[in-house]
Image (cartoon, helix red, strand yellow):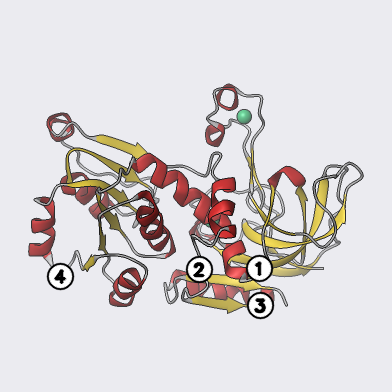
Amino acid sequence: MKAALFDGSQKLKIIDKEKPAIDKGQVLLKVAACGVCGTDIKILDGQSHSNPPVVLGHEFCGEVVETGAEVAELAKGDFVSVDPNIYCGKCRFCRKGQINLCENLTAIGVDIDGGFAECCAVPTGQCYTLSKKPIINAALMEPLSCAIYGIQKADIEVGDRVVIIGAGMIGIMMIKLSQLAGASQINVLEIDEKRRQYALDNGADRAFDPAAEIHKIQKLKQEDCDAVIECAGNTTTAKLSIDLVRPGGTVVFFGVVPNNEVINLRPYQIYKKDLTLRGSFLNPFTFSTASDLINSGKIDFSSIDIARYSLENIQAAIANHKGKNNLKTMIEFI
Ligand SMILES: [Zn+2]
Ligand SMILES: [Zn+2]
């Protein structure tokens, strides 16, 4: 089978690889689609952990084509999306229910072979059954499950005013989830004009350019926004989040600011505003919520701006994702 191998260099190599053998608790998936994620780019740039040589791709879905001897839950022909994060269940964090902090976390498509390949072996516990169409919904389950965890941490109550910084794919998910959580007003900050329009088309009430509309951002600071969700992942907007949120409000740091970058914080501001500042890492216990929201039709990405590439053109797909040309870039296997 064809696979895109990360060997530690900055480019993925398309190689011929033997189809993975499955063990008794695994299924073999014929991969249908696999999203390109910022994490893949960070791995290629040496800014994020991986375990080369390894096949990357952790946002994928596919059809079950083989089942292990002890697999009862899934059958050939089932269509599933994969939660790539495998927790040990034995460490101190797992036993406290904080599985995303697992000391022995193994991620499919990061540590072990993933979805940028024609086939992938996956433990059944990581599989969630979904309808096949539209394929983009199944391919976006993993990022959606992460966004759901972020929304949970924002503690949005009915009627709350929300600010979402960054209107990439995650920002759009946060808009949809804020709507479902009952927000009365959803404000989006995004420097790219096309993405501001996507935000408005997908349920944002207002969309501002934080670089150009400084007076409007100043005004927004006085509007008592209850929650700010930072999805842009840069120091300027991380700092802005703390300034924007109302006293007593919550800031969620969802965007990944590079590890070595710092911001100046005034502890007095956090104290005096009585703020709650939270991180949001991975997707503990939220994959089934994501699958319920997709299967019920409450969340649907079928009209999202997406670029599709074949596996052979994965380098072009990565360049496209880096260039932020579309909301999502996906490798599709036909
Ligand atoms: Zn991802
Ligand atoms: Zn663990």
Mark 1 vs ligand 1: CB below 8 Å: no
Q: Is residue 155 left or right of residue 282?
A: left
Q: Residue at x 22, y 34 (%)?
A: 275
Contact? badges 1 and 3 (CB < 8 Å): no
Q: Residue at x 32, y 47 (%)?
A: 261
Label 4 sits on a secondary structure element that is loop
Mark 3 vs ligand 1: CB below 8 Å: no
Mark 1 vs mark 4: which is more N-terminal?
1
Mark 4 vs ligand 1: CB below 8 Å: no
Instruction: Please give the residue where the numbered disc 4 appears in the rendered image.
Output: 212
Ligand 2 positioned in quadrant = top right
Instruction: Please give the residue where the numbered disc 1 appears in the rendered image.
Output: 33
Q: Which mark is residue 301?
A: 2
Question: What amino acid is found at the position of numbered circle 3 in the picture?
Answer: Ser
Between marks 4 and 2, how big is the CA–CA gap? 30 Å
Closest to the camera, between mark 2 and mark 1, is: 2
Between marks 2 and 3, how big is the CA–CA gap? 20 Å
Q: Residues within 10 Å of mark 4 (few under 14, many from 20)?
A: few
Residue 316 in view (yes/no): no
Q: Residue 314, how many percent across, how many down?
A: 62, 73
Label 2 sits on a secondary structure element that is loop
Using the rendered view, name the quadrant where residue 194 is placed. Answer: bottom left
Question: What amino acid is found at the position of numbered circle 1 in the picture?
Answer: Ala
Between marks 4 and 3, how big is the CA–CA gap? 38 Å
Question: What amino acid is found at the position of numbered circle 4 in the picture?
Answer: Ala
Instruction: Please give the residue where the numbered disc 3 appears in the rendered image.
Output: 310
Mark 2 vs mark 1: which is more N-terminal?
1
Mark 4 vs mark 3: which is more N-terminal?
4
